[in-house]
Image (spheres, rainbow, N blue to C red):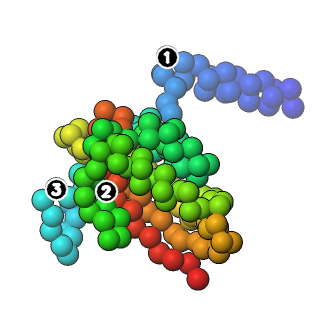
Amino acid sequence: MKKLILIFLAGAIFASCNNAGKPATDSSKDSLASAAPAQVMNYPYTIEHPDNWDMGNKQNTMTMLTGLKAFENGNIAECMKSFGDSIHMRFEGLDKTVSNDSLMAMFTRNRAGIKSMSIKMEDWESVISKDKKTEYVTLWYTESVEDMSGKKDSMDVVNDAKMKDGKCIELSQYTRKIN
């Protein structure tokens, strides 16, 4: 029995010595390295730049989330720090470029009619084009509001924010009322 334990111990020592000098590998890197080459897709629709996006700057996400949280809390001045000097707005019934001051007035009027507001964030993503020229942050959330008369309403919202130099320069909003 002692000989069997001694043989087992010697084998274990030999096996551990055999790996000495080999760098430790990260299993996730191994799986990525052995992954198949990128598959060429034959999409049923064509666009100029398919599969054009990489993960973007997390600071852009923080900028947009901070601005939305400030709007939710009724702090329009803080919200406006997320926007550039000129912002192209694309909302239902609105498609125009406005100055930061005009947007602040629009947001102030809108928020003044809201007694309370809450956001339930679902997800977000920051992306940058492969040529590093175009950046977007997309937010998916549910917005619940109570107006000054006590009427409550909720909607699903998707915001696409085009970013430049850490500020939103274009904001598109898509909504779906929840009944």
* Residue indicated by mark 1: 21
Counting from the top left corner in percent of width and height, residue 121 is at 57, 57
Q: Would residue 79 be found to the left or right of residue 161 on screen?
A: right
Counting from the top left corner in percent of width and height, residue 45 is at 18, 73
Q: How many marks?
A: 3
Which is in the foreground here, disc 2 or disc 3? 2
Residue found at x 35% / y 70%: 92
* Residue indicated by mark 2: 89
Residue found at x 41% / y 54%: 106
Disc 3 versus disc 1: distance between alpha carbons?
45 Å
Q: Would residue 68 be found to the left or right of residue 171 on screen?
A: right
Crowdedness near tag 1: few (<14), some (14–19) or many (≥20) residues, C-alpha within 10 Å? few
Q: Would residue 80 be found to the left or right of residue 38 on screen?
A: right
> Is 15 situated above or below 160?
above
User: 43 and 134: which one is in front?
Assistant: 134
> Is 154 situated above or below 10?
below
* Residue indicated by mark 3: 49
Element marked by disc 1: loop
Disc 2 versus disc 3: distance between alpha carbons?
24 Å
Q: Earlier in the sequence, mark 2 or mark 3?
A: 3
Residue found at x 59% / y 49%: 74
Crowdedness near tag 3: few (<14), some (14–19) or many (≥20) residues, C-alpha within 10 Å? few
Q: In the rendered image, is residue 36 in sight?
A: no
Q: Quadrant of the C terminus?
A: bottom right
